Image (tube, coloured by chain):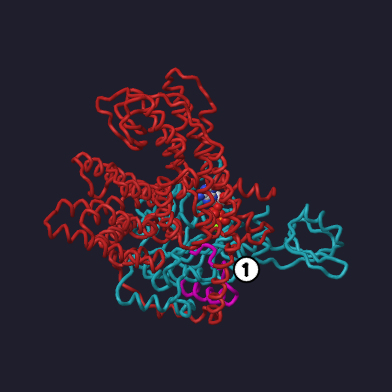
Chain colours: A red, B cyan
Amino acid sequence: MKALLSIIYLDYLKRIRSYSFLVTLCLSTAIAASFIPQPEASYSTVNVGGYTGFYNAAWIGTVTALMTSIFLSMFGFYLINGAIKTDRESGVGQIIASTPVGNFQYLFSKVLSNFLILFTIVLAVFAMSIMLFFFYDAGYPLDIGQFIKPYLLITIPALFFISVLAVVFEVLFKQYGVIQNIGFFFLFIALSSTAILDTTIVNFDIFNGKIASDQIIAAAEQAGSVPENSGLNIGFSLNQGQKGKKFLFEGTSFTNGFIISRLILVLISIIGVVLITPLFQRFRQSHIGRKKENKKASLETDSISGMRLESLSVPETDFGIMPILKTEFLLLVRSGKKWLWLLNLTGVVLLAILPLSIAHQFVLPILWFLQVGRISQLSSKEQAHKVHYFTWFSFKAMYRITCTQIIAALILMISLAVPLLLRYAFQLNLAAVGMVCLGAFTVVTFAFVLGILTKGKKLFEVLFFLVTYINVNGMSAFDYFGAMDHNNVHWYILIVMIIALMTIGLFKRYREIYA
Amino acid sequence: MKLEIQKVTKQYSKSKYGVKDLSLTLENGVFGLLGPNGAGKSTLLKMIATVSKPNDGVIYLNKNNMIKDPNYARKTIGFLPQDFGVYPNLNAFEFLRYIAAMKGVAGHKLETRIAQLIEGLNLMAVAKQHIGSYSGGMKQRVGIAQALLNDPKLIIFDEPTVGLDPDERVGFRHLVAELASEAIVILSSHIVSDIATISDQVGIMKDGQLLAKGEQHEIVKSTTGKVFEIEIDKDFLPALKESHIVINVTHQSEKLKVRYISDHPLEGSKLQEANLEDAYLHITKK
Ligand SMILES: Nc1ncnc2c1ncn2[C@@H]1O[C@H](COP(=O)(O)OP(=O)(O)O)[C@@H](O)[C@H]1O
Ligand SMILES: [Mg+2]
């Protein structure tokens, strides 16, 4: 038991020291804060038919708890998954496999350290929400219970579920990181749409805390002139001249049935871990596979003497980039499972046959997101595989590596979009062609630069998921591929952002290679 | 080829030096760098390989400043890092082609050279498999192959024999001997026997400094007349270890036979011929 606790603790320590954790922490608090805008702000983020609640403890606590449960469920998964894989790759897994720690204990320790990571973020958001309460001081008493209850009953069980889900996915789809990433994307969409359909009897509502949102809506309706059937709006909306439309929300009364359903959710999650335990191979699989191949190979291994050096042919020199480009592209194509190309192919066909607007707005971002595993290591793979000693310190490495990596990824992204590009080209809609290309360049830039800045792939994966999700839901603020209407400013901002990111990324890489 | 290292210092933090004020001049031949773990061998070799920059000092290769302009040297360096990796989903051919491209090696002779290296390093049987499935020794040999792709004239091997079995070590020795006729070959190890058999010149490092440098017999000379052997009771061993450098202990029925280094031998000791291992321990344990 003590050993287990220290495994969890050390695992936790290791992971909160990562860069992606810090970024997620900041991002989460920033997002949560954005849901409680300044009282005088001309926009609102959470509202019912344009009405927002007075800034009492119940409103601030409930809204931040709700939003955290939604957003952190989404990108928290990407932050925490891969815990078992890390152990496998670092070899720690094999050490653990040789200890008396049982499979269930091991998996459960991963669940707990996953959960601790998310919980840490929740604590930060919680602390911030209390700070906001004092900061905006609207004259209501600090009812700490109204802060704690929604976090305890809505956010925490949801995040526990996510912590389990990450482990379950890893056990079920072991090496297939891509399936984990993409599978969760679809599962999340499915789960959040069941939340809309749910009834009070069967509570599938894992992330949304419908009980709270319903009561917020009810409170708003009581306050008066809310248009009928207005739900809880999440997302930026400008309240044009409607400043100060407020209602009093006095907190959610959580029914016993709801509390029990949350406990059941936690229980089901734990049972889920029990159920997948027999499927967990305890780091044996890859081990055996490797052993076998070694045997086969070592049968033919004699000695390396007999090497005749003078007979070695001396090749010419050529510092061009084509051969490097070839390998970079090969690496992109090879990563991930082969059958994923079937999915890609399906996407390409859909791009060609579906109505243009659907192809552009839905198929394209999803098809590109399917490449997340391929391009997320674009610029960090050298360090991840410790190949950078070879590549970074070769002749004019900076220029040659940078060019080839960016071009290879661009070729991949653009060739997937070819049907769409051709359709626009036939319409002579060159603006759309340009925007799709800009979209490809945006994705590649983010993959490339975030890889350099974080030396890993997590942050990019998290962001790419988030942005894709938002885009597929039709919110236009993060549209980077021109599927929705925008004014020019949107594109200027995007281009400035690309240039700024590239500059920072290239600067850091330059420092790494030449300093 | 002439490599001049002048007063090179690498500082990791305020009080932590990887290499401190180290100078060394090398010409064609094999230079073996010996030192305990943490001595600063890798730190020094990485600076020579232009992988990291010293905080102070200069390194010249044929009068070209390698620190100011690493590109001249990079064309002619072959470096096997101690702690390197591979792309697991490429096979040996593909990986070597990739590194060759990085090094700017090309042309139709490149394929021949890659094939020769793979053949010569006995990787032919596995060359079409992804490197992810290789054993440690095979991966090490891929590392050695990549270092030789560009016909290097400054060859740096950091702990090259790790993971090689005895047969492979013999092969490696032949290889190094041949390379050294027209290149500077620097190799590091913390195992004396690895270095003793291959090196023309030996350097002994500790705590970031070069404690000794020269031909093997010169280094051994400093210890000649100080190596002894004695038979003692088991109980005396701790006391002996306190006051002398014990090299090894063999059990002989009731007694222990102890080989040790001392300026003031115990009574009943027999003088022994010193070898490089004795000298190494003598110098580093002082
Ligand atoms: N990147 C680094 N940051 C801080 N200290 C380092 C770093 N690399 C090496 N060191 C320290 O410098 C010393 C020399 O290390 P190294 O050159 O790897 O020794 P060797 O190769 O002889 O075993 C060690 O004490 C090591 O801890
Ligand atoms: Mg070392």
Using the image as rendered, state which of residue A287 and residue A257 is in the foreground.
A257
Compared with residue B152, is residue A265 higher up or lower down, i.e. above or below? above
Q: Which image quadrant: the N terminus of chain B?
A: bottom left
Residue located beneath label 1 in the image: B193
Tell me: A107 left or right of A429: right
Residue A273 percent location from the top left of the image: 58, 55
Badge 1 crowding class, 10 Å Cα cut-off, few under 14, some 14 to 19, many 20 or more, is few
Amino acid type assigned to the residue bearing label 1 in the image: Ser
Which is more toward the observer, B1 or A410? Answer: A410
Residue at x 59% of width, y 59% of height: A275
The reply to whether residue B20 is visible in this rendering is: no
Residue placed furthest toward the top: A139
Residue A317 percent across, percent down from the top left = 30, 68
Chain identity of mark 1: B
Is B17 situated above or below A214? Answer: below
* Residue A378 location (% of width, % of height): 37, 57
User: Residues in magenta?
Assistant: B156-180
Q: How many marks?
A: 1
Q: Residue visible at 42% across and 57% down?
A: A183
Q: Residue drawn 81% across and 55% down?
A: B238
View extreme (left): residue: A428
The spot of residue A114 in percent (x, y) is 54, 48
Is residue B221 or residue A184 the one in the foreground?
A: A184
Residue B164 highlighted magenta (yes or no):
yes
Which type of secondary structure does the marked residue at label 1 adopt?
helix
